[in-house]
Image: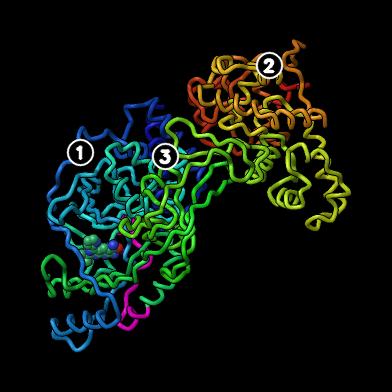
């Protein structure tokens, strides 16, 4: 038994490592995110139940303790060199000529070219295949020990892959944040009212130097190797071979590495420049190296940079222009964002006329005002940023902009929670900017579950002004829908049919559908169970709301402000008048089916007669809690065909297992 648990834990670790490698190194994921999360969850649970089998290099052990104060100094065994620059074709050709002359050769030797990633250099050290140290470059001689933080970077393996590797292997590379990860992270930070980063480079640097590894683990950092430090045995005779060997060991290596004659390298520069915006990360040039390690060594160094390499830089992506105005944009979730309108400027190949300012804290931090001359930075497809104001060119008459008190779209009042950077329109259902998002949510499967009413149809209905509030959906007719977006008579009837059936709902779904801020499915269910009746909920005081499980002061005030808006109450009344209704849960009619209160159920595998959501909902009606993972606390596991690890686990824990037929029988009339 314990043997099989230990080996199951090992299998899970191996599987997760393989998926990490496929995803980060090969760039070809072989499972979906939710399956991956499921494996990790299962592993965590087993490790919790069997701490004696905990492997310090398990993928669950990436986040460790934080340093007491700052990072320790690390002296690099082999110093981390810097790299010389060239800025145009002429200078690049001189670089080639110098190499040829120094080597007394007739031709320029074979070279490699790789994107010059715009991040920060990092050295990671493996001993006996285990990651033991990670250090920043610092001044090239001494850096900072950032091992705890680097362990959280998922693309860096905690142990090397394969069975043969040098006893000591120090790898140099660049830590970066991909453009899409950067944008998503800044959005998250901004919504949580935290400081946003100006660009991916600063975000990577700031994250790596963050003292709390648990915060670092939420920062989407990536790493690509570009060279070696101290090694106990050579990995190859050329840079290309070394990079291939690293890839074999599970280390991410930039896929853009090419090898060729000088002429091919010159062509590669133009292609890379053309590709620049489409790449997933920011680059500021192309690094060219002599491929042969023997020739690299023969060439030696000038000052702190090797003669065998150069960074062929791209033209700058920063320039100054005048900020004409700061406009307000209302996002689909009601967040009001200041946007800088610029005097158009040609930058890195495109004309830039807008730049994001994120939020009003950022406006204050930059102290940016209409009329200012500003430095603008554009990087790939990241929205252009304002880097700074050129202070001595500020017009005398300039005034800071005021934070708006009403929504520029619907004139509803603006909310700003204590200490939050984001300000929001309180208009919700009535704000045109938020209409599509609200209606999509209202019709979604877990809300009113209106089949056939998705983004595309809603866009058309909004555009035609047939639907402005959720109530309008219930006023549509099949005749009017027919012909929209090539909709035939049958599909029009189907849509109307699902709109009509959605009228029969539950109180919890209805509450969730209203889209009150922070009232998700679970909170909606608790509120429905606690108040039972819409009238009582609308009348509930802040204090009444706070008495509900899971409802804190912030959610309580969101609920209060929602129901205080007259338009919201009248839309609710319209919905009810149009026939939206739910069973009265306060009536004490005897419930069909057994009482499952206090029990925890888990569903796995496929169900045929109902969806998992439907089954979960019914189980909840009977009083059970429905959970996603099997543990010793699980009362019953419902296993359909295809059930995998959860079933094995339930069996090993002695949890009752039933099939779908038994479940259906249990539901009976429900
Ligand atoms: O992508 C990069 N930023 C990059 C940096 C790269 N692809 N290769 C590099 N190669 C070197 C040498 C030639 C010294 C091994 C580098 C750097 N150095 C480097 N980055 C920061 C300082 C030096």
Alpha carbon of mark 3 to alpha carbon of mark 1: how far?
35 Å
Whether disc 1's CB lies below 8 Å from ligand 1 is answered no
Q: Residue at x 27, y 33 (%)?
A: 65
Q: Which residues are magenta?
A: 243-267
Around disc 3, counting alpha carbons within 10 Å, would you say few (fewer than 14), some (14 to 19), or many (20 or more)?
some
Is 88 located above or below residue 242 in the figure? below
Q: Which residue is mark 3?
A: 12
- Which mark, residue 70? 1
- The colour style of the image is rainbow
Q: Earlier in the sequence, mark 1 or mark 2?
A: 1
Q: Nearer the viewer, mark 3 or mark 1?
A: 1
Q: Circle 3 — which element?
A: helix
Q: Is residue 659 visible?
A: no
> Pointer 1 and pointer 2: residues touching (CB < 8 Å)?
no
Q: Residue at x 13, y 58 (%)?
A: 79
Q: Residue at x 84, y 48 (%)?
A: 492
Q: Quadrant of the C terminus?
A: top right
Alpha carbon of mark 2 to alpha carbon of mark 3: how far?
50 Å
**What is the x, y in percent for residue 425?**
58, 39
Is 571 located above or below residue 304 in the figure? above
On whether residue 249 falls in the magenta region, the answer is: yes
Residue at the outermost front position: 397
Q: Earlier in the sequence, mark 3 or mark 1?
A: 3
Q: Nearer the viewer, mark 1 or mark 2?
A: 2
- Which mark, residue 536? 2
Q: Looking at the rendering, which quadrant does residue 132 occupy? A: top left
Q: Circle 1 — which element?
A: loop
Around disc 2, counting alpha carbons within 10 Å, would you say few (fewer than 14), some (14 to 19), or many (20 or more)?
few
């Amino acid at each position: 038994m314990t043997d099989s648990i230990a080996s199951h834990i090992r299998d899970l670790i191996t599987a997760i490592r393989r998926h990490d490698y496929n995803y980060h190194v090969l760039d070809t994921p072989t499972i979906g995110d939710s399956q991956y999360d499921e494996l990790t969850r299962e592993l965590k649970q087993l490790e919790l139940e069997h701490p004696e089998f905990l492997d310090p290099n398990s993928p669950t052990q990436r986040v460790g303790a934080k340093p007491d104060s700052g990072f320790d100094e690390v002296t690099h065994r082999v110093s981390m060199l810097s790299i010389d620059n060239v800025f145009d074709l002429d200078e690049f050709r001189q670089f080639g000529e110098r190499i040829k002359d120094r080597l007394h050769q007739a031709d320029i030797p074979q070279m490699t070219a790789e994107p010059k990633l715009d991040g920060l250099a990092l050295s990671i050290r493996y001993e006996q295949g285990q990651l033991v140290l990670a250090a920043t470059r610092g001044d090239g001689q001494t850096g900072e020990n950032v091992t705890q933080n680097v362990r959280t970077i998922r693309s860096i393996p905690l142990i090397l892959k394969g069975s043969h590797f040098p006893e000591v292997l120090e790898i140099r590379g660049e830590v970066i944040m991909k453009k899409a990860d950067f944008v998503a992270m800044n959005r998250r930070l901004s919504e949580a009212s935290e400081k946003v980063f100006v660009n991916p480079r600063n975000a990577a640097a700031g994250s790596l130097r963050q003292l709390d590894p648990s915060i670092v683990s939420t920062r989407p950092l990536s790493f690509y190797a570009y060279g070696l430090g101290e090694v106990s045995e050579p990995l190859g005779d050329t840079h290309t071979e070394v990079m291939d060997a690293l890839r074999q060991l599970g280390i991410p290596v930039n896929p853009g590495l090419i090898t060729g004659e000088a002429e091919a390298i010159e062509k590669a520069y133009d292609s890379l420049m053309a590709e620049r915006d489409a790449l997933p990360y920011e680059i500021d040039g192309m690094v060219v190296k002599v491929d042969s390690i023997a020739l690299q060594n023969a060439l030696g160094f000038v000052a702190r940079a090797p003669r065998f390499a150069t960074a062929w830089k791209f033209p700058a992506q920063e320039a100054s222009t005048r900020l004409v105005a700061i406009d307000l944009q209302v996002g689909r979730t009601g967040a009001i964002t200041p946007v800088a309108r610029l005097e158009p400027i040609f930058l890195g190949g495109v004309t830039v006329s807008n730049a994001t300012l994120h939020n009003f804290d950022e406006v204050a931090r930059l102290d940016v005002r209409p009329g200012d001359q500003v430095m603008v930075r554009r990087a790939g497809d990241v929205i252009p940023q304002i880097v700074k104001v050129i202070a001595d060119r500020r017009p005398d008459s300039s005034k800071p902009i005021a934070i708006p008190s009403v929504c520029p779209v619907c004139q509803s009042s603006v909310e700003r929670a204590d200490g939050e950077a984001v300000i929001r329109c309180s208009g919700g259902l009535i704000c045109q900017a938020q209409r599509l998002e609200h209606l999509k949510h209202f019709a979604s499967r877990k809300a009113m579950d209106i089949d056939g009413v998705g983004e595309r149809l809603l866009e058309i209905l909004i555009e035609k002004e047939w639907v402005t509030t959720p109530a309008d959906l219930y006023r549509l007719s099949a005749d009017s829908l027919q012909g929209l977006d090539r909709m035939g008579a049958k599909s029009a009837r189907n849509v109307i049919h699902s709109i009509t059936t959605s009228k029969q709902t539950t109180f919890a779904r209805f509450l969730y559908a209203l889209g009150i801020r922070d009232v998700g499915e679970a909170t909606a269910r608790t509120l429905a169970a606690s108040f039972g009746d819409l009238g009582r909920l609308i009348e509930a005081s802040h204090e009444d709301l706070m008495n509900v499980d899971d409802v804190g002061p912030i959610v309580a005030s969101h609920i209060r402000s929602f129901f205080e808006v007259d338009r919201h109450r009248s839309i609710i009344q319209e919905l009810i008048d149009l026939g939206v209704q739910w069973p009265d849960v306060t009536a004490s009619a005897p419930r069909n089916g057994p009482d499952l209160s206090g029990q925890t159920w888990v569903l796995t595998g496929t169900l045929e007669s109902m969806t998992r959501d439907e089954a979960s909902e019914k189980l909840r009606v009977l009083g059970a809690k429905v959970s996603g993972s099997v543990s010793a606390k699980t009362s019953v596991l419902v296993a359909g065909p295809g059930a995998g690890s959860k079933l094995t686990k339930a069996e090993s824990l002695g949890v009752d297992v039933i099939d779908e037929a038994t479940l259906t029988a249990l539901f009976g009339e429900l």
